[in-house]
Image (cartoon, helix red, strand yellow):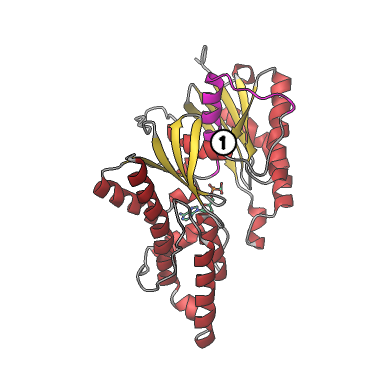
Amino acid sequence: MNQGKIIILAIESSCDDTSAAVIADGVILSNVVAGQKVHEEFGGVVPELASRAHQQNIIPVVETAIKRAGIQKNEISAVAFTNGPGLLGSLLVGTSFAKGFSLANNIPLIEVNHLKGHVLALFIKENGIEYNPPKFPFLCLLVSGGNSQIIMVRNYLEMEVIGQTIDDAAGEAFDKCAKVMGLPYPGGPHVDKLAKTGNPHRFVFSQPRIPDLNYSFSGLKTNFLYFLRDNLKGNENFVQENLADLCASLQFTIIEILINKLRKAAKQTGINEIAVAGGVSANSGLREALRENAAKLKWNLYIPKFEYTMDNAAMIAITGYFKYLNGEFAGQNIVPFAHTEI
Ligand code: KG4
């Protein structure tokens, strides 16, 4: 059935999700993600615990991915893995596993940049679902827990960051503000849910004045923290009594900041193929704002399927596939990097 197909097994272990996926000629066959509950009680990811959990998860996750894909190990053409950016200890687990797998099965090794993976998630094909990827060149708003960037995507493997955060990422702003409201980690999805019943114009928070296409979220975070502190002095139940409005107003501000620069980028470049990627692209308010802007400004908008927005190995597999086609392979001396550019 898979004869002649290029089959990529991919591993993603850059943060706190252990994931493995299999794709054949760009069509997804399996995508398995094991989260790590161990961090919840700490209100954030603890790097040492993350790498230990990856070590426990990686073999069962890979075995499940291969089984669900319905393939044999000897059908795999290459093994791809995330080599950064991310937590070094976590990356090392995936890198070491991929190297071992490559040696043991005598197949090529492909290193993948995690951020490129988020962007190329837009090109994952699914059996029975219409394939409608963006056309080159397109602009991609990449918003995750660690990044907020506007990327000019010229080709599958040719990308340029034209704007990025100078401090916190959008996901960090969601998570840190959620934390001061006492919401569980990661706070982004909780803020999204609570915002649905709140008034986004009830509270006004500060927006940065940053030149060019860059972002900044640290001012908003501080503004939000001081606002809560001041109001809690007069009413210790201020947060509980206003939770939905606080979430809605915070989310509204983050979305305004993100969309304003994206509009500026589209205008400056004259590009109307617009995509969004990364964990924060799961945000319902952001998706709605993007759709509104697309209708108004005649953008062709591309939003990845929900399961491919969060950290997952399917996006590493599709990137690995394009690198395979391009003949870009890594040697056994490859090492992961905590910080790497796209
Ligand atoms: O892409 P991702 O899974 O990991 C990184 O590579 O960073 O993104 C995780 C981030 C977290 O900050 C999380 O709070 C945020 O994405 N997030 C959301 C939503 N779902 C996930 N933020 C806002 N609204 C959501 N629905």
**Residue 317 at x, y = what percent?**
55, 30
User: In the rendered structure, which segment of residues is drawn in magenta?
Assistant: 311-333
Q: How many numbered discs? A: 1
Amino acid type, residue under disc 1 in the picture: Ala
Decide: is 179 above or below 82. Answer: below
Q: In this view, does 147 lie to the left or right of 198?
A: right
Q: Residue 209 versus residue 91: which sits nearer the camera?
A: 209
Residue 317 is covered by the magenta coloring: yes
For the residue pair 123 and 170, the one nearer the viewer reads as 170
User: Residue 36's spot in the image, x, y percent?
Assistant: 64, 50
> Secondary structure under badge 1?
loop
* Most distant residue in the front direction: 211
Q: Is residue 259 magenta?
A: no
The residue that appears at 36% across and 41% down in the rendered structure is 269
Q: Which residue is drawn at 54% across and 63% down?
A: 218
Q: Residue 35 appears at what percent x and percent y?
A: 60, 47
**Quarter-wise, where is residue 336 in the image?**
top right
Which of these two is toward me, 87 or 272?
272
Extreme residue in the bottom direction: 234
Horizontal side of residue 61 vs 286, given as left or right: right
The residue beneath circle 1 is 313
The residue depicted at 63 percent of the width and 22 percent of the height is 329
Relative height, residue 4 to residue 281 (above, below) = above
Residue plotted at (44% across, 62% down): 209
Q: Is mark 1 within 8 Å of ligand 1?
A: no
Q: Is residue 245 above or below residue 41?
A: below
